[in-house]
Image: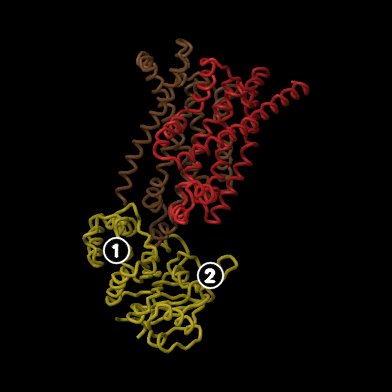
Amino acid sequence: MATSSEPIVSAERVTKDFGSLRVLDSVTLRVLRGERVVIIGPSGSGKSTFLRCINGLEPVTSGRVVVDGLEVGGTGVQLSRVRSAVGMVFQLFNLFPHKTALQNIMLGPVKVLGLSRDEAKRRALRLLERVGLSDKADEYPGRLSGGQQQRVAIARALAMSPKVMLFDEPTSALDPELVGEVLEVMRQLASEGMTMIVVSHEMAFAADIADRVIVMDKGVIVEEGPPQTIFTNPQTARTRVFLTRLLGRSGKHEAE
Amino acid sequence: MIELVIAHIGEFFAGFKITLVIALGAMLGGSLLGVLTAIFRLSHVGPLRVLSLSYIELIRNTPGLVQLLLVYLGLPEFGIRFSPLGATILALTINNGAYLAEIFRAGLQSVPKGQLEAAAAIGLPRTATLIDVVLPQALLAIYPALTNQFIQTVLFSSIGALIGTVELTQVALILNTQTYRTIEILAALSLMYVGISAVIASASHRLGVRLERRYH
Amino acid sequence: MNWAEMGLEIAYLLRGTQVTIELSLLAFAGGGVLGFTIALLRVLGGSDVTLVVKPLVDVVRGSPLLVQLLAVYLGSSVLGFSLNPLTAAFVGLSINAGAYLSEIIRGALTSVPKGQTEAGLAVGLSRMYVVWGIILPQAFPVIVPAAMGFFISLVKDTSLAYVLGLLELTRAAKDIVDRTLDPFHTYVIVMLIYFALCYPLSVLVRVVDRQLQHKGLARERL
C-alpha cells in the first residue's frame, strides 16, 4: 500500500447550495494515492453530494476540487479527462439495460478511450473474470441479480483504468444476502492498492479496509480518524449519537 | 354482406391502399416533424421553445378536420393548391407531428436520470450518450404509444373522404350511392377498419414482446 | 363586407359555437353514463358478459368516428326512423364516447391494487359494495384527468357532425365561406375559436395531473 505525499484528490472548502438549502459547508478533504477513505453519517449529511462533486456530477457553488492535477469543472474536454480518471459506482447500479454486461463494460473504452472493439472486449472479459462473472458476459442486466449488476457496474468503472474509485452507497439497495459478494470485490480492489472513497453504512467493512473514516453531518465533517478511533472511541458527541443510533438498530456491536 | 364485399373487392383494396399511403405518409412525415419539434421543445433557446410549444398546442387543441379544410380550401388563396390526397397527407402530417412530438418528448424524459449520470461518470460525450444510451431506451418506452398513434392515424384518414380523397371510407360511400345497401356497406367498412387496427396491434405486440424478451 | 354583414357572420359563428358546446356536453354525459355502465358490467360481470361486451367496445374503438356517425344517420333512415342531424350526432358521439370512457374507467378500476378488493371481501363486504365504496373512490382521481382529456377530444370530434349537416362550428364556417368566399381567414378564425374552447381545458388537465402526481395518485400518461 504505497502512498505518495501529493494528494490525488483535493477538495478545498467545497460548498454546495441547492437553492436556499446549504448541503455542503466549506468541506475540505485531501486523499492520498492508495488511501482508502470511508465516509459515514446520517442521511441528509451531504456525503453523497460531496462524492458527486469529486467527479463533477454536481458542480460546486464555491470551493475547489482537484483530481490528479486536473481541476474539476471547466470545459467539457477537461471534465471528460477527470471522469476518465475517476470511476464511480452508484447505489442503483445504473447499468444500461439495453446492453449486455460485456457491452456495458466496453462502451467507455471504445467511445471515450478510443480502444478497438477487440481490445475493449478483451479488457472487459478480464474485468468480468476479476469480479467473478465471466459466465454472464452476454446477459442483459434485467436477468442479473442486484449483486451481480453491481459487480458489473464496478467492472464498468474499472474499464476506464481510473486512478480513484468512488462508491456511493454501493450495497444500500441490495438484499442482505447479496451484499457480501460486492464487498468482497471491493476488498479485493482495496488490497490491490486502488485509491477508494466510499460512502457506506457497512461498518464492519469500513473497519476492515478503511485507512481513514470521515464522519459527516449536516454538510460538515464532524470528525475524522482511523476506524479504531472512530468506532470504539469517538471524540465528538455527534459521532457518538450517530453510531449509537446506527449500531443500536442493527442489534449488534459491529466495530469490534 | 360478404358477397357484396367480394364483388367489389378491387375497389375496396384500392381504397385500402390509399388509406395506407395516407397513414404511412403522415406517420413518417409526422415523425420527422415531431422529432424536430421535440428537440426545439427541449432546447435552451427561448424562441425555439415558444415556437414548438405554440405549434403543439395549436394543433392539439383544434379539430383535425378544420386543419384539413384550412390546407385544402384555405391555402389556394395564396396560390398553393393540393390534390385531395396531397392535402390529406399534408394535414395529417402536420397533425401527427404535434402528437408525436409529445410522445417523443415523454420518451426522452422517461429515461432515468441515473442513466445520464452513469454515462457522464465514464466520461461519455453528449452525442454518444444520446445515441447509445438515451435513444434506445426512449424508443423502447414509446413503442406502445407509437403503435397507438399509427392506428389512430389510420382511423383518422377517413376524414379525407370529406374532401374527395378516394380512401377506404370514400370507396364505401361511393358504393352506397350506387347500390344503396347502406347497412351492409357501413358494417363491412367498420369491420375492415377493425381488422386493420387488429392486425397492426397484433403485429406490433409480437414485435414488442420479442424486443422485451431480449432485455428481460 | 360592411359591419352589418360582419355582425351577421359573427352571430352565425356564435350559434355554431353554441351547438358545438351543447353537443359536446350532451355527448359527454351520454357517453359517461354508457361508459360507466359498461365498465361496471365488465368488472362485476363474469366472462359471459365480457364475451358479449368486449367485441362491441373493440369495434367502436377500432373504427373511425366518421363511419359511426354515418352509420347512425344513414342507417337509422334506412331502418325506417329518421333522426335529425343533432340527435344522430348525439347518439353517434355518445356511443363512441361510451366505448372510450368505458375503457378509461375500467382501466382505472383495475389499476387499484388487488389487495384492496381482497381486504374488502375478507371483511365480508359484497362485491357490489367493494367496487362502489372502495375501488371506485380510489379509481376516481385517475379517471378525472383522463376523462377531461377525452372531453377535449370530444369537443374536437363534434366537428365531424358537419357531415350530417348539423349546424355546429365547422359547418358554420363552411356556410360562411360559401357566402364570403374567404376560406383562409374564416377557417383560421374558427380554429382560434376551437382553440379558445380547448386550450384552457388542456391547461386545467395538466394542472390536475400535476396535483395528482404530487399526491402520488397518478403517473405521467403518454
Left or right for B78, reference B208: right
Quadrant location of the C terminus of chain A in the rendered image: bottom left
**Amino acid on which disc 1 is placed:** Gln
Task: Write the residue at 40% across / 85% down.
Answer: A231
Q: Are marks 2 and 1 in contact (CB under 8 Å)?
A: no
Task: Write the residue at 43% across / 17% down.
Answer: B184
- In the picture shown, does residue C27 fall above or below A181? above
The chain identifier of the residue carrying mark 1 reads A
- In the picture shown, does residue A225 fall above or below C72? below
Name the element at disc 2.
strand
Q: Which chain is represented by brown in the image? A: B
Left or right for A81, reference C93: left
Name the element at disc 1.
helix
The chain identifier of the residue carrying mark 2 reads A
Give the CA separation, mark 2 to mark 1: 34 Å
- In the picture shown, does residue C103 fall above or below B9? below
Q: Position of residue C58 (x, y in %)?
A: 43, 33
Q: Kindly identify which residue carries mark 2.
A: A16
Can you tell which mark lies on residue A148? 1
**Amino acid on which disc 2 is placed:** Lys
Question: Within 10 angstroms of label 2, few (less than 14), some, or many (20 or more) residues?
Answer: many
Question: Within 10 angstroms of label 1, few (less than 14), some, or many (20 or more) residues?
Answer: many
Q: Position of residue A1 (x, y in %)?
A: 29, 81
Q: Nearer the viewer, residue C34 or C215?
A: C34
Left or right for A205, reference B62: left
Q: Colour of chain A?
A: yellow
